[in-house]
Image (cartoon, rainbow, N blue to C red):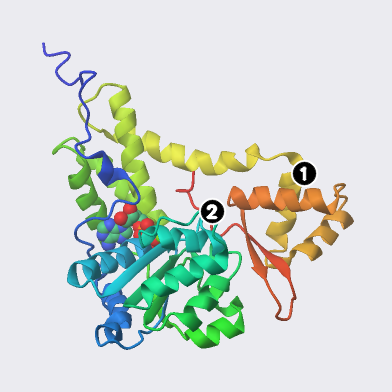
Amino acid sequence: MGLFDNMLRSDQTLIKNQEALEYEFLPKMLPYRDQEQRKIAALMQPLFAEKSGRNGFVFGSPGIGKTAATRAVLRELEEKTDDIIPVYINCWNKNTTFKILLEMCDCLDFKFTQNKRTEELFKIIKQLLNRKSAIFVFDEIDKVEDFDFLYSIIEEIYRKSIILVTNYRDWLTNLDERIRSRLLPEMIEFREYTPAETRGILGDRMKAAFYPGVWEQDAFDAVVKKTAEIRDIRTGIHLMKEASGIAESRSSKKIAMKDAEEAISKVSQFHAKDTGELEEDEQFILGIIRDNSGRKIGDLFELYGAKGGQQAYKTFQRRIEKLEKGRYISVKKTEGGKDGNTSIITFGQMRKLTEF
Ligand SMILES: Nc1ncnc2c1ncn2[C@@H]1O[C@H](COP(=O)(O)OP(=O)(O)O)[C@@H](O)[C@H]1O
Ligand SMILES: [Mg+2]
């Protein structure tokens, strides 16, 4: 009867290439981002003539290929020349000057960083880079806590392009004027993908990751539809991974509509349940931030007290940190300027379904 023909053996899998389901996976081809890649590459053009390059500010919502496109340009540059050194840093974890300089040394294969102070590290980097030209990409630049590294690079590395990448267009407006006026970056906006482009990208990814024919057409269509709705390719990749896991767990050789539906409902549920994980006081604070998004932390603390909040400022600060870690809110530190040294707290916005 062939009752068991459609069952996977325990040593079988639907996935041909697990790596292709990682978010950091950089496909060989990056369709629909030709223009953006050209704009980024054009910034570096003067470096080929041993002049100083131009700078760029790459922005657009999450999961639409900013990181992928920028890295693809660097990859091509590396294949083309040894005279321009690419330095790519993701500031998500490397969010202080010291950490960034350490990471740069690592990029440059300089190993003797132990016990070195910030200034010493920068001196080494400067020596290494000033022999040639350099291109710096600081991805997720909105996560950095101080800008000394940027200032030093602007002032002391001679032939370079600096590219800042972020999900927030407005981030630049709040950047220290001294730095902004020296950078004068070209604005490179990434628009969201159309549904057809989303289908194209996910289709390529499916082919790279899965054995042929394992996806039922309607299941794949459902993933595409959801991804196009959320407009974030990362969600689509996550859904493909989830759905295939669900199919495998029932030993199916096919990923069917019900697997896709289950994966999609998990993603949606996650969103609904996640504020439930917060403690009452944190929920209370989150509510205040939602209604007063974009205010200074001190003002929010006053509101918190006025509305009956009981905790001291230190505790309040810790809650803010936790909410930021959970990406319920974003925190932007300002230095100087009209607000002095404080933090501006913004509700939600960065929290997307893909950030589990
Ligand atoms: N044009 C594209 N072609 C192929 N894959 C893409 C494309 N755009 C985005 N991706 C993939 O989607 C995922 C999210 O893209 P990413 O560059 O990380 O987004 P962002 O940096 O804008 O948040 C990555 O896995 C990336 O490889
Ligand atoms: Mg990115």
**Residue, x 53% and y 67% (percent of image)?**
120
For the residue carrying disc 1, how many other residues have a C-alpha within 10 Å: few (<14), some (14-19), or many (20+)?
some
The image shows residue 346, relative to residue 266, as above or below, that is: below
For the residue carrying disc 2, how many other residues have a C-alpha within 10 Å: few (<14), some (14-19), or many (20+)?
some
**Residue, x 21% and y 30% (percent of image)?**
254
Q: Quadrant of residue 195?
A: bottom left
The image shows residue 279, relative to residue 124, as above or below, that is: above
What amino acid is found at the position of numbered circle 2 in the picture?
Arg
Mark 2 to mark 1 CA distance (whole Å):
20 Å
From the viewer's perspective, tell me whether residue 276 is left or right of residue 24: right
Q: From the top left corner, tell me how far across and down residue 196 is, in percent.
A: 25, 60
**Residue, x 43% and y 63% (percent of image)?**
104
Residue 239 appears in view: yes
Secondary structure of the residue carrying tag 1 is helix
- Between 236 and 311, the residue placed more toward the observer is 311
Q: From the top left corner, tell me how far across and down residue 302 is, in percent.
A: 85, 61
The image shows residue 202, relative to residue 267, as above or below, that is: below
Q: Quadrant of residue 348?
A: bottom right
What amino acid is found at the position of numbered circle 1 in the picture?
Asp
Task: Please tell me the numbered disc located at residue 142.
Answer: none
Task: Please tell me the numbered disc located at residue 351.
Answer: 2
The image shows residue 324, relative to residue 2, as above or below, that is: below
Residues tagged 2 and 1 counted as in contact (Cβ below 8 A)? no
Secondary structure of the residue carrying tag 2 is loop
Task: Please tell me the numbered disc located at residue 281.
Answer: 1
- Between 156 and 249, the residue placed more toward the observer is 156
Q: From the top left corner, tell me how far across and down residue 37 is, in percent.
A: 28, 73
